[in-house]
Image: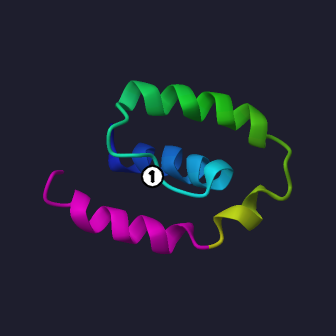
Amino acid sequence: MLISELKRVNEMFYGIKGHLFPESYTAKEMRSVYESYFKRAWGNEEFYVHIENFEEVWENRTTWLTPIL
């Protein structure tokens, strides 16, 4: 999974659940959850209220991801 896709699926998950995917999730599981949550978020105008600080949280995640990638 490319970092751009990883960020996109995590952003959706964060908007619904309020946290990033656990490290134990596989790429296949994350994509499946993303597809399900995409349907839930479609047309939800409040969705972006829930991801206000996503970039800050994502930056912390990518700090430890960088050596792996």
Residue that appears at 84% across and 49% down:
44
Q: Residue furthest left?
A: 67
Residues 25 and 47: in front is 25
Q: Give the image location of residue 27, x and y in percent.
A: 37, 31
Residue that appears at 50% across and 70% down:
55
How many neighbours does mark 1 have within 10 angstroms: few (below 14), some (14-19), or many (20 or more)? some
| Residue assigned mark 1 | 7
Q: Taking 31 as reference, is 69 left or right?
A: left
Q: Give the image location of residue 30, x and y in percent.
A: 46, 33
| Amino acid type at image mark 1 | Lys
Does residue 68 show up magenta in the picture?
yes
How many callouts does the rendering have? Answer: 1
Residue that appears at 76% across and 66% down:
49
- In this rendering, is residue 58 above or below 38? below
Residue that appears at 55% across and 66% down:
54
Give residue 1's quadrant in the image: top left
Q: Give the image location of residue 31, x and y in percent.
A: 49, 30
**Residues shaded magenta:** 53-69
Q: Give the image location of residue 59, x and y in percent.
A: 39, 70
